Structure formats: structure tokens, C-alpha cells
Amino acid sequence: MATTYETIAGRSIERLAALSDGVFAIAMTLLVLDLRVPAGAAIHGEHALFSSVFVALAPRLVPYVLSFMTLGIFWIAQQAQLDAFARSDRTLTWINLGFLLAVTIMPFTTGVLAEFITFRLAVVAYWLNLVLLGATLWASGRYGWGAGLTKEQVTSAPRVAHERRIVAYQVLYAIAAALCVVSTYLSIALFVLLQLNSMLGLRFPRLRGSA
């Protein structure tokens, strides 16, 4: 069989993981740039510092923490997925590049949410970012397993748990986004609770798994 570019491109799972680590690190760092400390000349006393920094920045601090948790959760999920693969191929690499595209958008949608926290469209934009993250991660796992790229000792159980977790959380994210019709703060609060659950396992024990 003749060797083609498609058969040799994007085969290193290690390079793909390294690229992902770098993109996640940059995106998580960029999140904090939206937290701007006011000029020192405008602050006179402890009360002014508290009100001008901590109170005034609260609408931006909450989306920052939310998105940092989100990126951490998806980084862990992707690493768990890549650990099950023995190798990559060109298609899997491009699917993961699509996933990383969604990662790089996160600082932007976080900034929009922080700036327009009472706007429903800002919540919807943030939710669509979560949809793109989940869809590309799900597609990566489904393709990798179907293409036989997994390690020999890996069974189908991790794949099933991984996919179930992604789908379940996407449904819950959609519910959280829909609550913006009532209140954008309610939507954001549920997003935060969902991410805390994913991190700490506070609720929904059946959703525990790859992330």
C-alpha cells in the first residue's frame, strides 16, 4: 500500500497532548486579564478599596472562577480520553484542534458574560461555547474508539462512562442556560454549581467519571 500524507499526518498522541496543555494554559491565563484593578489614585481608605475592587469586580470575578473551573474540567476530561488512545491520526487530530478552538474562545465568551452579565444573549453565547466543547470532545472519543486508536487493554466501559457524562452535563448546561429567561444570575449560579459538582462530586453521583 502506498504511503500517503493522510496516513502519516497527526499520528503522535504525545504531541497532541502537549499542544492541548499549552493551549489550555494560555486560555486559563488570559481569563485573569479581564480582572482590572482601578488606579491607586482613586482609592482613599480601606472602605474605598473594598467597594472599588472586591465589590465592583464581583460580576467579573464569578465568571472568571466559573470559566477557570470549566477549562480545568475539560482539560482533565480530554487528558483522560487521550490516555486511552495508543496513537492518533489526521482526523482525530483535527477533531481535537476543533476542541482547542472552543477552548481559545472561552476567554472571549467569559469577557462578554462579565461585561453584560444581565443580558440573556451573553449567557447563551457562553452556553454555546460549552456546547462546542462538549460536542468536539464527544466526537473525539467516538471517532477514536471507532477507528481502533485505543490501547489494547482499554475496555469499552471508560468510553461509555465518558460519553454518558458528556451528554448528561450538556443537558444540564442547557437547562442552566434556559433559566436565563427568568434570571441570568440564576443561570450563572447553576453553571457554578454544576462545575463544583464535577470537581468535587457534591451531587449527581452517577455522573462521576472521566472528568
Image (cartoon, rainbow, N blue to C red):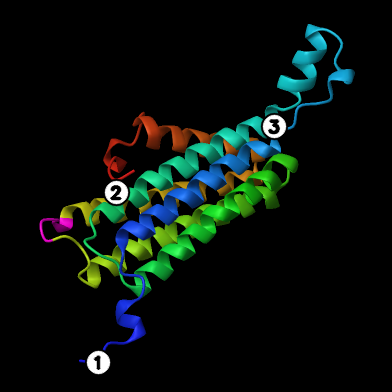
| Residue at image mark 3 | 59
- Crowd around label 1: few <14 · some 14–19 · many ≥20 (10 Å): few
Rendered view: 94 above or below 197: below
Report if the CB atoms under discs 3 and 2 are less than 8 Å apart.
no
Q: Look at the numbered disc 3 and give the secondary structure of its residue.
A: helix
Q: Residue at x 48, y 42 (%)?
A: 70
**In the displayed structure, does residue 195 sit left or right of residue 156?**
right
**In the displayed structure, does residue 193 sit left or right of residue 151?**
right
x then y, percent, for residue 71: 48, 44
x then y, percent, for residue 67: 55, 41
Q: Gap between marks 1 and 3, in whole Å?
A: 58 Å
Tell me, for residue 2, which label it has, or none.
1
Rendered view: 38 above or below 92: above
Residue found at the far left of this picture? 153
Residue 190 in view here: no
Question: Which amino acid, by three-letter code, is at mark 1?
Answer: Ala
Tell me, for residue 80, which label it has, or none.
2
